[in-house]
Amino acid sequence: MFLGVWASGALAQGQEDEKMLAAVTPRNHEEVPYTSEELRAVRNGFISSAWPISSDGYAYVKFAFVEDRQTLTGQLVNARGCREVRPIEEVLQTSNIAREDFVRDVEWAFQQWERIANIRFVPAKQEEAHFLIGSGEPAFSFLAACTNIRIGARGTGRVVPIRTAVIALDPMRRWRLSSGGSIQSPNVRYVFLHEVGHAIGLAFKHPFGKYVMSNKYIERFALTLWDITAAQGPYGVR
């Protein structure tokens, strides 16, 4: 009986996803704007978004730590936050964190996603990067960090391509490298593990508190089966 309930629920969800996909009008040109409803569908995960896959089957994402302030333009999925990123040094100085230690923990978060899906994070200069990491005030005061992505034209495919991503950390928080933190003193590894998930196209997962991609500060340092499956959908199994 439980299997039947699950199957019918999965079928209903699949039908709903197909409806949402159909609602996103195919675009052949980047300048054709998405509607607010379409952007919401992408943000909430009804429509998949992902970095383009290269000919060898991997998505290569060039990232950089922000040195010069930059403002995002274009089709941004998050309408309220992370439109501007400032140098990451603001966060490091406020929290008294050495840059090499911070970079180590960010790279750890990258590695967790690279181990389970065909995606690679490649360091680059800021002017050449498509994924920027810096400081900035989130849209809401209760958030320690925020992520935004700029999407391109979907065309006739099933996945909306990600063109740019940013992660901005609130420089007013006291960031920490050790565990046992809180939303007021967040752990760098955990927050980046979660926010990088958003940066590669993953939405929040309900119920809260059970997954890395839950909308709750829980300091989970291991990807769950749902997190892994969600990443492997658009990027493939490593």
Image (cartoon, rainbow, N blue to C red):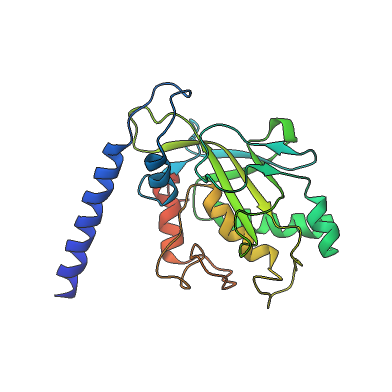
Name which quarter of the figure residue 24 lies in.
Answer: top left
Please tell me which residue is depicted at 59% across the width and 48% down the height of the picture: 81
Task: Give the x, y percent position of residue 207.
Answer: 40, 70
In depth, the one of 155 and 78 nearer the eye is 78
Q: How many marks can you see?
A: 0
Q: Identify which residue is drawn at 71% across, 71% down.
A: 185
In the picture as drawn, the residue positioned furthest to the bottom comes out as: 180
Q: Position of residue 13 (x, y in %)?
A: 25, 55
**Quarter location, residue 96:** bottom right
Q: Position of residue 118 (x, y in %)?
A: 50, 46
Name the residue nearer the viewer: 165 or 63.
Answer: 165
Looking at the image, which residue is at 49% across and 62% down? 213
237 to the left or right of 64: left
Q: On the picture, is 117 further left or further right than 157?
A: right
Which quarter of the picture shows residue 176?
Answer: bottom right
Left/right of residue 85 with respect to residue 61 in the rendered view: right
Residue drawn at 53 percent across, 39 percent down:
76
Q: Quadrant of the N terminus?
A: bottom left
The image shows residue 102 at horizontal and vertical percentages of 77, 58
Position of 170 relative to 149 (above/below): below
